[in-house]
Image (tube, grey):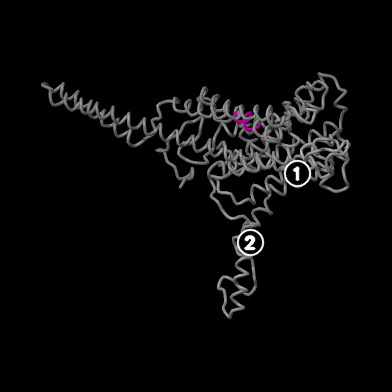
Amino acid sequence: PPRSADEQSSRRPSALPLGPLDVLGAPRPYLAAYRAAMTLTTAVAILAVDFSAFPRRLAKTDSTRGVGLMDVGSGSFVLANALASRVARGLTTSSPSWWFAFWKRASVDVSSSNAHAGGGRDATNDATGAAPPERAHTIARTLRSTRWWSLIFLACARGLATHAMDYQQPVGEYGRHWNFFATLAVVDLCATATPLPPAFSSFAGLAILVAHQTSLLRGASPSGAGAAGVASSYGEYLLRDVPRGEGLLEQNKEGVGSIPGYVALYFLGAGLGRFVERSLCDAAKRASIRATTRALREATEEEEAAREAMIAACTAHEQRVATDAAETARAKRDSALEVGAGLGGYQWAWRWLLSLAVADAAFWAAAMTLHARCQAVSRRTANAAYCAWMLAFNLQVLLAFIAAGLLFPATPPVPKLLAAVNRRLLPTFLVANLLTGAVNGAMDTIHVGTLTAWASMVGYLSVVCVVGLALDTVLSPQSVRAHSGTKAD
């Protein structure tokens, strides 16, 4: 089983840019930097888009399908959480969810009733009928999660604030009452409550995505088909501005209809993170074995040569020199056996990075094929082309951070600001949303000049960074701040 970071000693193979290499789920500097940079970039974009100085071509696409720079925000946020999840980091094993425990308990109750009817008694059923401890524990972990309730609170608060401030929010983006925080809350609940073994996360994500895409292409419209102005499929119903009913689901059809796509993206991201983590540790282990074997062979050869020279020595001086050489070779051999971590530079890491680049190229090919042959990219429905695009884009960004760490290994693994934002991802994003609303309430952002827009953005981002650092200082113990971990909020 994987060992924890606290159980490791100086014998652990470690490479500074990549973190401890024989510990699954160890802090990965490149992952922490990626998550923090994604959050800060998103924080910049959500306010900058309100200024006329911001190029419209970088905003979210106005059409029902297509791509824009800001379209990567929602998918990237879901993937950032998935890549740092316990499943992706190899820190969890499969366990029954609360609803699985419920049905298991129900079957036990039925068996117990049958036993009572026959005059027997099931020892597993008590007189009170209380829920088993494992079910109660799982329910508490799922429904009493601070993170989950925080997302629910944020979803409600943003909805109320948007309506109170009359903030421009296209109804066709998520619906009348829905927002991205609500999507995150549902995705988090589905990910927590689904009893999937970690190895099957990718398969589950792929199955959900195939079912979701099939429903978008062939599913029946709730409003009927064939009538004039009415969508002929479920996907068209979600995208077209058809008359909305009075029900809550129809009022928020875009947000609710995209949930399966984001859930699939989360599971695919967790599977991708698991693959990256395990492939890194496996590549490092193979490199360590090769380097240790090579160093041991060379040290043994030198020791044999020194021993032969000592036997052939004629003078006391030559014998003393040969003895010193033998001792040096023996010490070198013992060092190779003790450390066992001579990874031979970063050549192995570049080969590992190349294998990830091949996988990223496959994602890009899948995204372009789905976009051209299946259905055009649509962030509003989170269709297959969008999910493939998000996987390709975010893996490419992650590879860039890994390459930067390998090219500049002497630099600090993670700057203090990025490490703090990574540990406080959700609170930092909340502060950015609150400040965005405050700035929009204080000025007419769409009509201000370029200089004012730039000054506002500098002040806004400075406050976000300072608050992120302050939150991390207050909420994190000193022992945690000493690391650049990748734990999700």
Residue 278 visible somewhere in the drawing = yes
Residue flagged by tag 1: what amino acid is it? Ala
Decide whether the magenta segment is chiefly helix, strand or loop.
Answer: helix
On screen, residue 317 above or below 228: above
Checking the image for residue 182, the label placed there is 1
Residue flagged by tag 2: what amino acid is it? Trp
Q: Specify the quadrant of the image occupied by residue 478.
A: top right
Give left or right: position of 62 versus 334: right
Residue 473 visible somewhere in the drawing = no
- Mark nearest the camera among 1 and 2 is 2
Q: Specify the quadrant of the image occupied by residue 55.
A: top right
Outermost residue, bottom side: 119
Q: How many marks?
A: 2
Question: Which of marks 2 and 1 precedes in the sequence?
Answer: 2
Q: Which residues, given as a range, are shown in magenta?
A: 390-395
Give left or right: position of 397 versus 65: left
Give left or right: position of 60 versus 87: right
The quarter of the rendered structure image containing the C terminus is: top right
Q: At x 49% / y 42%, what residue is drawn?
A: 5
Residue 175 coordinates in the image, percent (x, y): 82, 40
- As helix, strand or loop, the secondary structure at mark 2 comes to helix
Nearer to me, 260 or 315: 260
On screen, residue 139 above or below 208: below
User: What is the distance, in whole Å, between disc 1 and disc 2 at their CAs?
Assistant: 28 Å
Q: At x 64% / y 49%, what residue is drawn?
A: 192
Residue 435 coordinates in the image, percent (x, y): 78, 34
Mark 2, residue position: 103
